[in-house]
Amino acid sequence: MKLFAALTALLCSAAAMAGNFSVSGDKNDLVIKYNDEILVKAVDIRVPAPPTHFEHKVMPDGSQVWNAWNDNPEYKYRREIALRADNCVEISLSCDIPIFNSDRVRGLTLTLPYSFVEGGKYRALTTNGRSWKPTSGAFTADLPNRAFPDRPYRFMTLEKENKNLIFDFNPIGAGDYCLMYSGGAVRGVWNVERAGQDLKLSIATSVPVANDFTGTKIIIREGRFEDYDSLHAQRSFSYGDAFKPLALYSFGDNKVGNIYTPINLRTYSKRNRAGWVDSPELKTFTSHTEGAYYSHMAGKNATFRRSRLAPGFYIITVGAGNGSGTENNFSISVNGEVLEKNISVKPGTVHVASKTFHINKDGILDVKFDGNFIVSAIGIQFLTSDAEDFFFNRGFWVSDGFEPASIYRNIDYKKRPVFPLAADTFVLPQPGKEAANAVKNIKREVCLPATNSPQLAWLPSGNWFKMLSNSSSLSEADTPEKVEKLIQSKIAGKKYDAVMISGMHSRHTYINHVQRGIDAFKVMADAAHRHNLKVIDHHDATLCWNVDAGLRSLAELLPEACRNSDTLLPSYQLCPSDPAFCERYYAYLTELVKNGVDGFQIDELVYWSNGCVCQHCREKFYNATGCYYPVNELDKTIERFDSEVMRQWFEWRKAAIADWFVELRKRCMPYNKNLVLCMYTTHWGFTRSHARYRASSCLFELARSINYFGTEVMTRNPLMTYRSLLPYRRMKNVLTLSYNTPIWAWVYASGHPRIYAGWAISNMSKQVALLPDLTLQPGQADFMAFDTSKENMPRTGVQAHTKVALLFSQASRDWNSGIGFENELFGLAQSLDAEHVSYEFICDLQLNAKDLARYKVLYLATNTCISDEAAQVIKDFARNGGTVVLTSIAGSNDEMGRPRKEWLFKDVFQFAPRSSGGYKATALNGKKLAAPQHVWALAGTVKNVKYFAEVNNTRVPLVVEAACGKGKMIYVAAALGAQLWEREGNQKTASRAKDFDPAVDSVYRQIMTEIAAPGRVWNVNAPEKVVTALWSNDKKIYIHFFNATGVTVKGGDKVDPLAPREPYPALTGDITFTLKNVKNGKVIAYSPDFAGGKELKSVYSNGDLSVTLSKELLKTYTLIHVEQ
């Protein structure tokens, strides 16, 4: 006992050493030294009150820890300084901040004597872990007193004489995707600042009200910048990335992809680091000239070795393709641990086996084959280094003790991980024959609640708010008292129908919190229902990032992981085809429904662009299409999105994701027949070619089960982007037309003028706007009160008041070739808006006689992909008296993008646009162009030219009209709309690449408005930048006006984050308009900008109603009711 006491006294003395580092001092006044020189003279925490408890511990391995904490429930926190036995210093901070605590700033600062670093150099990684951005500099004597450039840093090294030190601000690693979040994360982005005789390393955050946790961690150790790759498994990380291998070896004698390193018969040596131990007798068998899995090596009882690996956790994959029918029966172990036993790869199949293993400090990986084996590939993926292991073998803290927060607690990781085998077997197809027997066997089941259900009546006009955030811990509102206070703070003085609750976004990575999360949702749902609020749970389904248990969860869920298409190795995402994933996740979601959740917004329930090509995906693909996904990584058809096998692959994947949601709804039906399933995209996510981007989540397909669609409006300034925003919002209404589903818009903006614009344009589009919290200042319009008033237009029972339709074809969106789809179509829409031509978008589903009967004019723009059936409907529309307008090569492909032998409309026009060549026009209709414009050359007989372009003083056809039954078809030989397209834009990307050519603008708008004349329902003299929208039902016509006259956009300018100095200038004149073929009725103007209704003067004559809106009644937004 005396010896033990003496030892303890020695260890607890004023100074403790570990290698070259030492810590001295007491309680909250600790000094860190390196080689007896002061390295850190103060460790300061920014918290509301000083620590009330202190503790010093000696760990079994000799590490020493100094803990300080405060357990006051209003601001619990703990700071730990650990002098670790492996010669490094680890400093950690965890804070709990109740969401209504007003003091929300927390921070940690290390103060270094500048003399310690002066004369040295630094190298660092800037910003967050989503990119690899090295920077460097010097600690010069004259370095100014200010923060270092390119901050913040996540990793920094000091190089000075005998001082080579690493300051690892993000020891968890780049896989911690949320390391820069202000709340709910272990922050790993630090500032470095010269402050006189000191160097300050600091991190601070104002924790959002939606979060109750923040933390940080820094490790100081010896080393150089080059040591990063042994300390961290990933240099950068994005959750949609493929999991690239550290090494991928092939064994055979054919051609393989560049990602492989051929090993074949190479014998291992310390110098080459990878090869066979003791030169075993091996033979090669090959069934095709290329592709790693079309060749293999065969042998008996051999070991493959890889050395000089950093200690940590690795996913090891061994794969074999048996195209030659080689007999085999074998088992595989890795460093003495079983990978898989009793493997027999049948002829014409592939078998891949993956599992997570730990590599020790010796850095050696031995893959041992027992029995008669075959091998085509061995993959090594670096999952987590020992240096960044805070989830496998230990927790957040070095020592157990007081836990201030609900997450990142040591107890969450006490249970040792179990690493299961992920083994797949599938067909090795005959190369080049994968799509030889393609069939159409994709079933499209529909499962939706009754649209007239009283429980869903709130959806079309439902206003809802967001509660908590993606990174919330869900302990922010896990008691009736907490959640009641939170809900009251949101709904006071407002009218809401639902709340979307986020938190613990990647639920499956919070391995010890699943039930706690369900319990929290039960409490929140009970409270919300007492306020007649529906609860929508927003979280992610498939991500495996390093949040909470993060990449440990990937190792433990490895059989559910995707396999990359080019390597067959596991990836960072979970697979929606995997039966175990589906059963586990369906059970979890069903449990939430049982506990009161009324609906879900499930993110990333998709197949990613880099996969999945696991056994289950391949089998389901074959059963649905008769096609095999290629195994040969060099197969050129994989690279071509429009090859036959990839066409089939795309069609199956988007159907399979919709099927997943159909099954979810069916599983939940016994507990909630009116479950709300939401899904949203950005505008770009809806308009991009899903096939080219290998996207699998298609809203048109998902409508078989999803009953509430939305959009993220990403510009951050709806006012400055009004020109593009209105048609993009109108575009989303094709889902309402097709499936009777309401649409909402998630508007990201700040400040009253910009948020007002986001609300107004959404309201003009018959859509709910979900807006950020806004405190109204005196004199500001309360548009949200207007939104829920009877003065606003109802969002049910109204339809677009128009006779003009623009085709937004999902087929052309995905498969267009030879010309852009989006730019011409939306340039056209923006031009019609500028001319106040009322229109609406339709999609392929409206290409039928009944739906088209509503319109008189149909614009096809550059929709190149039209089916034979749709073409017949379009021609019949014209023959029955309609006007059809098409541009350039519209109709040149079938509905899957396959080129047609003959242009679809040649029978009408007696010519066809040439597939190559054309003219460079210098003038249009006599107006000189600023730059030459491409005009298609026409092959055949061209008659009835309405407009010409000029090429070297020679006229060529620009607009041609052809009779078609009682109607006509009009062909435009130049994509002029694309020249007038303003993209959505943001603060990084210009809305307009260049200024619009006035000649193009003038001539194109003249042409399009002349064509639209038979379908115009009104005339109006409003300025171009006063945008309008018309809706109607059997009782009223609703006319929306929005004043964007203060907006000016120049070519090349990025979106201004601010509103103009005068965001909504006063109009210079009254607006008059005439509605055609309407009844006479009272006309009343309403607006958030003035109280009550204002009756407008009107004159009725011969079925037309003329109205004057005085300039004083349109400040920002005005809605006119015309009684019918």
Image (cartoon, grey):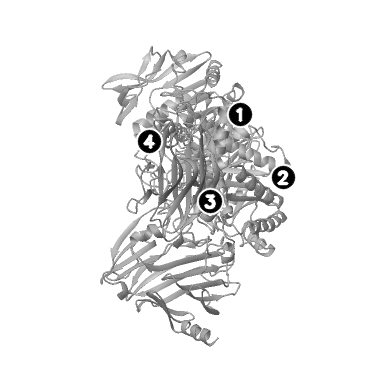
Residue at the bottom extreme?
Answer: 2
| Location of mark 3 (residue) | 338
* Residue sitting at x 34%, y 51%: 269
Task: Identify the image quadrant of the C terminus.
Answer: top right
Q: For the residues carrying marks 4 and 1, which lies nearer the camera in this image?
A: 4
Which mark identifies residue 672?
2
- Image coords of residue 598 (percent x, y): 68, 48
Which mark identifies residue 253?
4
Q: What residue type is labelled 2?
A: Asn
* Residue sitting at x 54%, y 21%: 870
Q: What residue type is labelled 1?
A: Val
For the residues marked 3 and 2, what is the alpha-carbon distance in whole angstroms?
A: 45 Å
* Residue sitting at x 57%, y 70%: 404
Q: Which amino acid does label 4 sit on?
A: Asp
For the residues marked 3 and 1, what is the alpha-carbon distance in whole angstroms?
A: 80 Å
Between 221 and 9, the one nearer to me in the picture: 9
Q: Is mark 4 on a helix, strand or loop?
A: loop
